[in-house]
């Protein structure tokens, strides 16, 4: 390679790295500015499902909650504290688990936004160590996930994602080990998509579920 070509190559690489760094810095700045706003106390949410998993020694509840618009960790904590107060106003319990999602279709497939445990030492396994209703002996354990909401799945993508899992579980219920490639093809045919579109949606949801950018706002 000639000296001039090497110089041009190095220059282009430097420009590309600089552009990537600018994009990353811009995203971080946007998230920081967004999180400097005060807690939004009017974010709508719904308790989609309330389950009991009580034992002779302890009363435990699990609430599945869906938040209908973009939230930050501080908003999620505010919502969770309101839910804990609401639970305390009802029947006495030893432990409460709150799972928070951005779509109801995700219920049963792992929470996406947060998990909150209100129990003795924040541990469900210690529920039987206190009396039901002895809330002063309980504390909160937080597992909240800060999201970049531009990466959230669209409603149409969630429909495809849910169809894939429903199709997969139908085979499992029949005692059949599904071939994921065949499931991909079946769902793609139903929604007139390319197989690659289906796999992209599955990967996007997997990333969305576990992604946590809380380190940006600490």
Image (tube, rainbow, N blue to C red):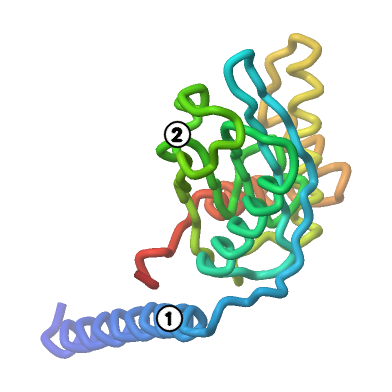
Q: In this orientation, which residue lies closer to the viewer: 169 or 186? A: 169
Viewer can see residue 99:
yes
Q: In this orientation, which residue lies closer to the viewer: 188 or 96? A: 96
Q: Which residue is at a point 60% across and 56% down the rendered structure image?
A: 80
The residue where tag 2 is placed is 123
The residue where tag 1 is placed is 32
Q: Which residue is at a point 30% across and 87% down the rendered structure image?
A: 15
Q: Which residue is at a point 72% across and 48% down the rendered structure image?
A: 89
Q: In this orientation, which residue lies closer to the viewer: 169 or 146? A: 146
Q: Is residue 141 left or right of residue 49?
A: left
Q: How many marks?
A: 2
Q: Is residue 215 left or right of residue 41?
A: left
CA–CA distance between discs 1 and 2? 31 Å
Circle 2 Cα neighbour tier, 10 Å, few/some/many (<14 / 14–19 / ≥20) = some
- Asked if residue 33 is positioned above or below residue 114 in the image, the reply reads below
CB of mark 1 within 8 Å of CB of mark 2? no
Q: In this orientation, which residue lies closer to the viewer: 210 or 101? A: 101
Residue 38: quarter of image: bottom right
């Amino acid at each position: 390679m000639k000296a001039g070509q090497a110089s041009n190559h190095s220059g282009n690489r430097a420009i590309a790295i600089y552009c990537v760094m600018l994009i990353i810095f811009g995203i971080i700045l946007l998230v920081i500015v967004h999180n400097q706003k005060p807690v939004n106390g009017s974010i709508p949410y719904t308790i989609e499902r309330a389950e009991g998993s009580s034992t002779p020694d302890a009363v435990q509840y699990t609430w599945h909650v869906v938040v209908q618009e973009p939230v930050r960790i501080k908003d999620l904590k505010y919502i969770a504290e309101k839910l804990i107060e609401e639970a305390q106003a009802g029947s006495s319990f030893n432990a409460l688990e709150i799972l928070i999602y951005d779509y109801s279709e995700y219920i049963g497939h792992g929470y996406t936004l947060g998990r909150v445990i209100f129990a003795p030492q924040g541990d469900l396994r210690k529920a039987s160590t206190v009396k039901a209703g002895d809330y002063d002996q309980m504390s909160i354990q937080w597992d909240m996930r800060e999201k970049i909401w531009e990466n959230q799945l669209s409603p149409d993508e969630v429909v495809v994602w849910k169809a894939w899992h429903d199709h997969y579980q139908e085979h499992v219920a029949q005692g059949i080990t599904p071939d994921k490639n065949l499931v991909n093809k079946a769902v793609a045919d139903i929604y007139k998509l390319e197989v690659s579109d289906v796999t992209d949606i599955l990967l996007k949801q997997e990333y969305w579920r576990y992604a946590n950018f809380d380190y940006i706002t600490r």
